[in-house]
Amino acid sequence: MKGWFARNPHIKYIAPAMGVMVLLSIIPTLFLVIISFTNYQLGWQFSRAKFTGLENFIRLFTGADKDFWHSVWISLAFMLLAAGLQMILGFLIASLLNSTEFKCKPLIVAIMIVPLAMTPSIAAQMWKLMLNAEYGILNHILQTLFSFKIVWLSPRLAFWSVLLVDCWMFTPFVTLIIYAGLRSMPAEPYESAAIDGANSLQMLRYITLPMMRKLLFLTILMRAIDSLKLFDTAFVLTQGGPGNATEFLSLHVYRLANAQNGLIGRAASVALVLLVIVSAVSTVLIKQQRKGTD
């Protein structure tokens, strides 16, 4: 044993972090896996729970849980739309900030930090007041200027309203990361390209995007994972409704575990599916990122 530690002296430095990871991540994940194969309910003693095998998962994938597939599809759709819109808007705003110099730029950057500094639940509560169909400021403006109102949190628009709030909260995050990357780009490749007659689009395609590939994929990865795990914003705005219009997988887990007699076993199986989806998306994005460096 002493010989192994002598060959791996770094272990003693990372051991505290590994211990925290085991306590906060690995042990709860193992508990989640075990519970997902039982019929355990909230308030039961563990001795009362019975092993049910794949029954919880069969219930999900055969459609016995009618809301499961709906939650899967809207979660994936939200991830694609949220991450895509935030990356596009963030890149455009960052490029604009990087290409122009003006006195108020530090103020603009400071304003973009405000959504990031707010707790998501507080920001969602603020937006819930703004989106109120009768008294919200957005409908007041629409009524004053165009003489009509929008029921923002209706079954038809609730999904898009949650998407709007999420984009408001995290587009500045994407913008600041990309802006920092653009500011760190060397000037020489652009000067050489300009001498060769390259235009702005060609510089973007052949210089900017390839050099920022790792940073962009890292940003997409973070936003995709966060979008898949979305809970607090949607819960405050809609509680998964109206109906199940915004019942993302995280909210479906919450409803099973808390609002339906504490079906912890079934909720754990849905949570495990969410974990698998997040891991699969992360693996695909990481492989795509590495593909350009191999």
Image: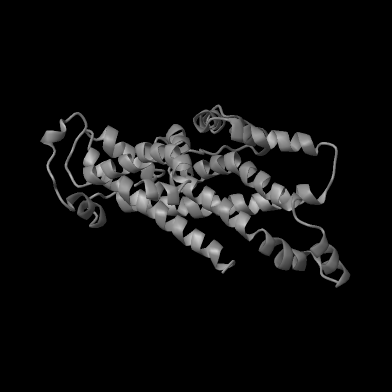
Residue depicted at 61% across the width and 55% down the height:
216
**Residue at the extreme front of the image, as rendered:** 3
Mark yes or no: residue 71 visible: no
Residue 68 place in picture, x, y as percent: 31, 50
Numbered disc total:
0
Q: Quadrant of the C terminus?
A: bottom right
Look at the picture and state if 246 lies above or below 72. above
Colour treatment of the image: one colour
**Residue at the extreme bottom of the image, as rendered:** 196
Question: Residue 29's quadrant in the figure?
Answer: top left
Look at the picture and state if 123 lies above or below 100. above
Left or right: residue 261 versus residue 113 is left
Residue depicted at 49% across the width and 63% down the height:
287
Residue 162 place in picture, x, y as percent: 50, 41
Residue 48 place in picture, x, y as percent: 11, 35
Question: Residue 145's quadrant in the figure?
Answer: top right
Between 239 and 222, the residue placed more toward the observer is 222
Look at the picture and state if 59 lies above or below 41. below
Residue 69 place in picture, x, y as percent: 32, 53
